[in-house]
Image (spheres, grey):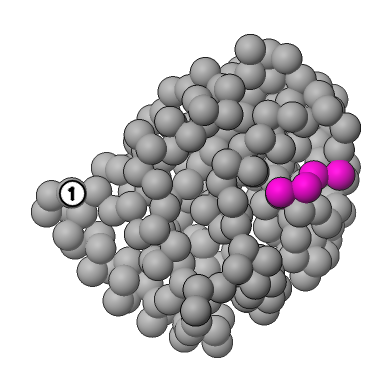
Amino acid sequence: MAASPEEKAKRVRRMFSEIAPRYDLLNRLLSFGADLSWRRRAVDLALEKAPRRILDLATGTGDLALMLKARAPEALVVGADFAPPMLEIARRKAERRGLRVLFQEADALALPFPEGSFEAVTTAFGFRNFADYRKALAELFRVLSPGGRLVILEFPPPPKGAFGLVYRVYFQRLLPFLGGLISGNYGAYRYLPESVEAFPSPEALKALMEEAGFSVRYELLTFGVAAIHVGDKP
C-alpha cells in the first residue's frame, strides 16, 4: 500500500535528521563542489529585485540562507525547515560567521507566516521532498508579497543523451554507495535518485508554477544536472 503524504513527510523528516551531521560534506563531495556555484546563481536571481524580507524554505543546514544574508546584510532572512537537527547546525554556522539569520521549524504545506510576509522565497534541493507540490506552491504564493519572487533550485530527472546515461549510472549506483558509506545511512542516498527520477521535468514544474499564479522562466545548469526556476508573483 502506498504511503500517505503524512507518512512520507515523517519518513523524509526522520531521514534528513539522521544525516544532518554529514549533510554539508556529502553535498560538496557528491556534486563535485558544483552545488556552491548553483547556489550562488540562485542567490543572484533571488536578490535581483533587492528584497528586504527573504524566506529560505527547506533551508537544511542553512547554506543558502547564509549566502543570502552575506550578500544582503540589511535584509531580514528567515531559514525554515522541518528537521530540527538541520536547524541546530544552521544556527551554529550562523553564529560562527557572525550572520543574523532567524532559523525556525516549519511545515512547507502550512507555513506559519501571514500572507505577503516576504518579498523573496528560495528553496534549494528541498522542493522535491514536499508531499504535495501544488499545495506547497499555493503556500509560497500566499506568503509572497505582490511583485515577490520565488526561486527553486532542484535536480530535475537526468537529461537524455550520452551524458544523461553516464550521469544516471553515477546517480543511481555510485552516489548511493558513497553517500551511504560516508553518512552511514544507505537508505537516504537510495532515496535521493528515486526522488529525482520521480520529480517533474523542468517544463512540467514550470507549468505547475504557472498554475499557481506565477510568471515563470527557468535555466538548466551543468548540462541539465540542476535547474533553477524563477517565479514572479504579479
73 relative to 34, above or below: above
To which quarter of the image does residue 107 belong?
bottom right
Residue at (35%, 34%) from the top-left corner? 203
The residue depicted at 38 percent of the width and 82 percent of the height is 177
Q: Nearer the viewer, residue 10 or 20?
A: 10
Give the extent of the magenta segment.
108-112
Q: Position of residue 50 (x, y in %)?
A: 71, 17
Residue highlighted by disc 1: 160
Residue in the picture at 39% in, 58% down: 198
Please state if 116 lies on the left or on the right of 210 as rendered.
right
59 over 2 or under it: above or below: above
Magenta part mainly helix, strand or loop? loop
Amino acid carrying mark 1 in the image: Lys
Neighbourhood count class around disc 1 (C-alpha, 10 Å): few under 14, some 14–19, many 20 upward: few
Is residue 132 something that shows in the picture? yes
Foreground residue among 114 and 225: 114
Q: Work out which quarter of the rendered image holds the C terminus and state it.
A: top right
